[in-house]
Image: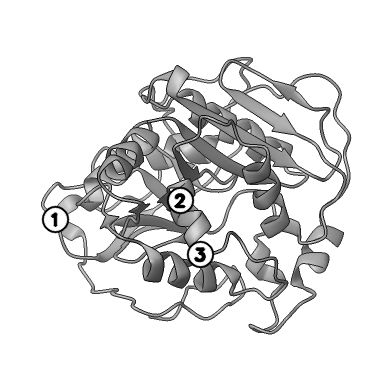
Amino acid sequence: MFITAIGPTYRRPALAANMLYLWEQQTHPKDQCHLMICDDGDTYEEQSGENWTLLSPPELEYGYLGNMQYIIDNAPKETEGFVFFHDDDLYWPNYVSNHSDALEQGDFSKPTFCLVHYGTNLQAERRTFWDTLGFTPDLLKRIGGLEMMKIPPFDWIHLARFEEKSKKTMEPWHTFDKSQFCYGWSATGYPHGSTFIANNDDTEYNRKFRDASPHNKLEGRLIAKQDYRTSVIYGLMQSLPSNITEPGALVENVKHHQPPVSSTSPPLNHIVTPPPVSVVTTSQINIVATHRSTPPPYIHRSKRPVN
C-alpha cells in the first residue's frame, strides 16, 4: 500500500530536521511511502529527497489545519492511505508499516496504546491521539474532507467524523511496548500549540502561536538530524515490560540536556547515553488506570492533563 505521511510544521527547523530523521528510519518500502512536509512560515525553499517533499506555500489562513489540507491537495496521485507525521511527536520505525497493514484490512487505523512525554515523565495512556491516525482517501471523502475551522477542538470533531463514517476500524498495534508513537507534549524547545488556547471557542489561538514563532529564513537543504530527546525516549522504550496491557503511569525521569556536538546523527538503534538520571526499575512502575473516552480539556503545556 502506498502511504502518504502528512507532516505539518511552522518555523521549527530543528523539529523538522528530527521529523525527517524519523522518516528515514521507517521500515516501510521507500517506493511505497512519501512524506509531505509543509512549512508555510517561509523557513525553507521548496525541495525534495528520495521519498519526501517539502512544500513552502505562502502563509495559510487556517494555520495547522490549512497546512494539512495543503498537503492532502498536493499528495501523490498513487496515495492509498494517509498517516499523520507531526514535527513535535516521535514515530518509531514500524509506524508507517503498522498503519499500512491495518489499512489493508480497514479504512481507519486508530491506535489506542500510546506513550506520552509529559515534562520529565514518560507515561502510557490508553487513548487516541489525532497525531497518530491513519485513514484511506475514500474515508476522507466520506467525512466531506477536512473542514476549515478556527476553533481548537477541530481534531476531536474530525476524529468523531472518522469514527462515524468508518466501515472498519483497525488497531495498528496492541500493547504499549509495541507502540510506534510517543506524543511530544513538552521539552521540544518550541511552544506547544495548546499553550495559546484560552478555551474551546478561542479562534485566535493559532494567530497567537504564529506570532510567537520567530521568522528565520534558512538557506540550503533540510538535513535529517536526530535530536537528543528522541534518543533518550527511544532508549527508555527499550526497557518497557512486555506484560503491560493496561494503561498506567510509567514514572520514568526523562531529563533533557544539550545534545552532543556531532556532524551526523546516530541511528535509532544507537542510543546516546545521557548523563546519570534517576530512573525507576520495571518492578517500581506504578500502574494507574488512565482510560479516556472523552477529550481532555485544553490546558497549558506545563500542566498534566486531567484524567
The answer to whether one can see residue 122 in this image is yes
SS label for mark 1: helix
Q: Residue at x 21, y 66 (%)?
A: 286
- Report the number of discs: 3
In the picture, which quadrant includes the C terminus?
A: bottom left
Name the residue located 29 percent from the left edge and 73 percent from the top edge: 290
The vertical placement of 124 against 102, above or below, is below
Q: Is residue 254 visible?
A: no
What's the CA distance linking mark 2 and mark 1?
Answer: 46 Å
The label shown at residue 283 is 1
Label annotation for residue 138? 2
Q: Return the disc, 2 or 1, that comes first in the chain's sequence.
A: 2
User: What is the distance, in whole Å, between disc 3 and disc 2 at their CAs?
Assistant: 9 Å
* Amino acid type, residue under disc 1 in the picture: Ser
Q: Is residue 195 left or right of residue 230?
A: right
The residue to which callout 3 is attached is 143
Quadrant of image for the N terminus:
top left
Where 188 sits versus 228, above or below? below
